[in-house]
Amino acid sequence: MSVTIKSVTDGAIQEAAAILRGGGLVVMPTETVYGLAANALDDMAVARIFEAKGRPQFNPLIVHVADAKQAQDLAVFDTRAKAMAEAFWPGPLTLILPRRADSPVSALVSAGLETLAVRCPAHPAAQALIRACGFPLAAPSANKSGEPSATTPKHAAESLGDSVQLILAAGACAIGLESTVLDLSGDTPVILRTGAISAEDLAPILGSVGYESGQTDKPKSPGMLLKHYAPTIPVRLKAVDVQPGEALLAFGSLKFMGVRGGGAAKDLPEGQCINLSENGDLTEAAARLFYALRELDRPEFKGIAVMDIPETGLGIAINDRLRRAAQGR
Ligand code: TXA
Ligand code: MG
């Protein structure tokens, strides 16, 4: 058996919804990364997600809804949460909220926590699929545990193989980084995972918002463990040259980049160098980051040298993922 990949059509959405209704798994496109979806109300279906991802332990999953109204049946929305949904949904913002006492969501989704992560994706295919199902979808990124998130149908297929029945294909994800995870379950709002929506974006509504470092042994957001995002070969950050045998993850101009022992980075063979953005555009770089890490993660390379990326705007989230990739093996 090999996985079926289908472009998004009404027929493919109906087929995917039928698989999900039967307790199966479907890969769906979202604006951030591809998601490995299951019926969030069905314990067995949710358990299959952990099986397919090969997760070492049960990390809590994000529940995807079609709109804020659907989310309010699952979790407790205070005025802050309502304002966030109003301002940023549909979009790349996940809210951690108290579970409702009568929440129908499988306890396995929250991995035993009293809180629930909810997100309303903006991608039309994800929207159509959730509406066709009529139930919310639990969906982590569509890759094996510990690997960079899949941002193309090809990478989802390579990573998950036969453990998923259908992949809904809609090209590369527009954002390419996972959603911002904002914890609103306590008195002070905290960003547990950086993403396309920044603390500055939230500030006009929430006031100043802090970050949880996530670099500790016991991160509050278990998915933030360092080994997540790690390729199988070493990753070297802030590289100013390329060592022999290394692949290059470039950003901006290659003009001044050399290969130690002789040669120029711009002459590296095709496949050994991927430029996240030749113009130094951080949005373009974010969208290509996980794609590039996966493409360069090949045993014939000694490692991946990564050029310096500015720590501003989306660069903050990009560097966060790259630090995990560098430290997490
Ligand atoms: O962009 C995204 O968020 C993608 C797409 C598919 O929507 N999904 C995604 O899911 O990245 P996943 O499972 O790879 O990451 C979920 C993150 C993890 O860091 C997890 O620990 C955190 O959300 N999380 C989920 N539920 C939580 C909870 N109740 N409390 C704290 N953190 C939670
Ligand atoms: Mg993930």
Image: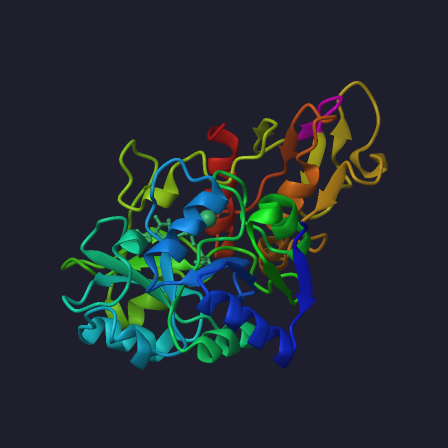
Query: Which secondary structure type mostly characterizes the magenta part of the structure?
Result: loop
Q: Is residue 194 left or right of residue 238?
A: left
Magenta-colored span: 240-246
Check the image and report above or below for 14 versus 210. Answer: below
**Residue at (62% x, 81% y) in the render:** 10
Q: Percent position (x, y) of residue 285? A: 62, 53
**Residue at (82% x, 32% y) in the render:** 264
Check the image and report above or below for 148 versus 167. Answer: above
Q: Percent position (x, y) of residue 103? A: 21, 67
Residue 7: name its quadrant: bottom right
**Residue at (51% x, 74% y) in the render:** 129
Q: Is residue 285 left or right of residue 117?
A: right
Q: How is the image coloured?
A: rainbow
**Residue at (68% x, 53% y) in the render:** 154
Q: Nearer the viewer, residue 223 or 65?
A: 65
Residue 25 in sight:
yes
Residue 171 in sight:
no
Check the image and report above or below for 285 versus 122. Answer: above
Residue 93: name its quadrant: bottom left
